[in-house]
Amino acid sequence: MQTYFIACAKGIEPLLFDELQRLGIEDVKQTMAGCQITASLQQAYTVALWSRLASRVLLQLGKAEVTTAADIQAVITQYDWQQVMTSSATLVVDFNGHSDEIRHSQFGAQVVKDGIVDYFKARGLGRPNVDKQHPDIRIAARLHKGELVWSLDFSGDSLHRRGYRQQQGEAPLRENLAAAVLYRAGISEQLQQPTFNFYDPFCGSGTLVIEAALMALDCAPGLGRAHWGFLHWQGHQPSLWHELLEQAEQRFKQARASFTGVIKGTDSSPRLIDAARGNAKRALLNQIVEFEACDALDAEAPAEAGLLVTNPPYGERLGEEVETLLLYRRFGRQLKAHFSGWQVGILAGDESLLKRLKLRSSKKYKLLNGALDVTLANYDLTKEQPEFTENQGNDIANRLKKNHQKLSKWAAKEGVEGWRLYDADLPDYNAAIDVYGDYLVVQEYAPPKTIPEGVARDRLWHLLETISDVLPFAEENIILKVRQRQAGSQQYQKRNERSESVTLSIREYQALFEVNLTDYLDTGLFLDHRLVRKELFDKCQGLDVLNLFAYTCSASVQAALGGANRVVSVDMSKTYLQWGKRNFDLNGLRGRQHQFIQADCFNWLRDNRDIEPFDVIFLDPPTFSNSKRMEGTLDIQRDHVGLIKTAARLLTEDGVILFSNNRRKFVIDEAGLEKAGFSVNDQTQASIPEDFKRHKGIHHYFIISRI
């Protein structure tokens, strides 16, 4: 009898403990990320061949207390390695742990390897060579709290590599995790039924389906593996091993001949279905399992009752969340409609996705899919599922329908394709919804600290689900963003969270503007300033216009289209100025009279006092900026008087400054400006368009002229 450590993924140790006992191991101790057993060689072979959950089998060779690297090399050199390997065998050492001297696993592995080589050299034998890719012998060494344990990697490679999966999707489940999911989903009970029916509607490359079939057909998961870590071990007994293999093959053959039932997988990707079929063929299951290209939302039960276990998309990327949550909601409806009488297990990356199924789970389990926390929820559809209703009732649906009916007609009559549909009208749904042609952009505001994160997320997803149900927009055209206050250069940083950018042109009165709905916090067009831009179009014919903090130059475009004599746009972002040039091109505006200047507006104003003055200066600075590209910081409440005075140096005697900003609680310093010789005409209320009337503090707008 010898000591072995049976490693597994964290979180499935209890399952492994039970499995080892079913395999006839009596002396089992559950530990972190595995179980320690005392077993005979035949039992160790059995575990390696039959464990569906283990990732490695490590045969403990020795252990010793060590302090230094020299101690490690000494105890390794003293160990009798001829009972493990010959000098002609290739090896590799895996090292885990650290000490004051051993700070890197690579160094620790080198020390152990040197000790093994020294052992053979001291006896006048050949020097074992290192082969990191396909070694004959793999040694695992672990250093923890001064104790070194060295073991033979009995399995030789991770046991999740069954040998059948050569093709896979982008985020496949490891085979041993798939087995754990199946156990947690109740496959053992299902296998006791006279007929075993199994279905996975998001099967990908078929891992869950094939693992379920291997269980149903009593097939040892290691039967298809060619390489084992014990094959070149000196203690290996080939006759015993081959006897176990023959027994396993016979069991598989008998079970395959007598199997009745349906084991099926479907996926919307024909490419993945082809991969699944190839994997099943290598597992000798192609005559048993069935794979078909089919959308999960069209799936119907392949039998009257059975077990459905699946791993739908998680929607890890923010831009994919809308489609993912809607997928879960519709899949929940599909399950209720077509899988009554089935047991269901669903693996999800976020519990709030599971809530969208609107099904009552019987059990939930936490698991780790690689580094990702996932939840397996089991549902008993032999029992009646209650109809879930939202606490908020139909208020949000009614509000969205009412707003769309009213504002869509207004926007069409007004001649604008970008407009705000909803802006936190109801306190529980703290988001803004903007229409851009055929697209919707949903901007989630950061929730108050008093609202738990889970509650806020659930409300957001209910909002998105309602949008899809009641508004005439394709779900792939619904784009979600999380909107928080940005400072300095953050406002210029790309933040594309979708696999593809969404850029389109929309009309605003007589102008066309390029908007990017995905790559930045803002889209390139501030919808609430629409009437201010219209005023530039209406009143700038024959005038010279300066646009400071020009952003994507949308105000400049309207001034130019309105017949301005000269339009100069200044912004410190090259990205946005290039965008502005594209906006000019969209509208057929070309000529030397249109200038685009990349500069810090403060520096540019200071350095260009002698240029020809302007009749109109449009001034729409950020609320706050501490960008490294500008000197000092900008706080518009603190600095607006000085900014206006500086800009006015480039203003004609009878010219005007159109000053706007989006600081919610901004208060203009009329006394300070009057002292500096300016009069202030507050046009804020007149500049708020119809679709922003609910939040009249969305921006502030003033016409400033000399007294």
Image (cartoon, rainbow, N blue to C red):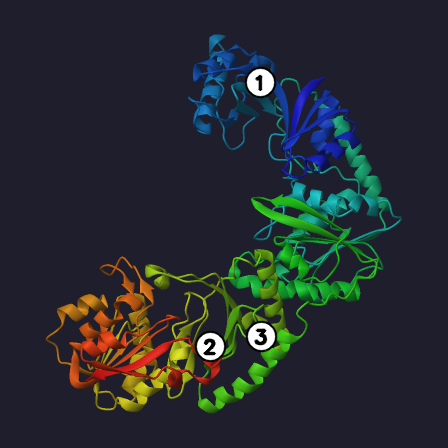
Name the residue nearer the viewer: 99 or 661.
661
69 with respect to 56 (left or right): left
Single out the mark in the foreground, 3 or 2.
2
Residue 281: x and y in percent read 70, 48
- Return the residue at label 3: 474
Of mark 3 and mark 2, the one earlier in the sequence is 3
The part of the image, by quadrant, that contains residue 402 is bottom right
Q: Amino acid at mark 1?
A: Met
Q: CA distance from mark 3 to mark 2?
A: 28 Å
Whether residue 472 is visible:
no
Q: Quadrant of the N terminus?
A: top right
The part of the image, by quadrant, that contains residue 563 is bottom left
The kind of secondary structure element at disc 3 is loop
Q: Amino acid at mark 2?
A: His
- Return the residue at label 1: 85
Instruction: For the residues labelled 3 and 2, say whether their Cβ atoms are less than 8 Å apart.
Output: no
Instruction: For the residues labelled 1 and 3, say whether their Cβ atoms are less than 8 Å apart.
Output: no
- Return the residue at label 2: 695
Q: Residue at x 70, y 24 (%)?
A: 37
Name the residue nearer the viewer: 411 or 70.
411
Residue 340: x and y in percent read 82, 61
The disc label shown at residue 199, or none: none
**Image: 183 above or below 415:** above
Of mark 1 and mark 2, the one earlier in the sequence is 1
46 with respect to 369 (left or right): right
479 with respect to 193 (left or right): left
Q: Amino acid at mark 3?
A: Ala
**Image: 236 above or below 267:** above
Residue 528: x and y in percent read 41, 78
Q: CA distance from mark 1 to mark 2?
A: 78 Å
Q: CA distance from mark 1 to mark 3?
A: 64 Å
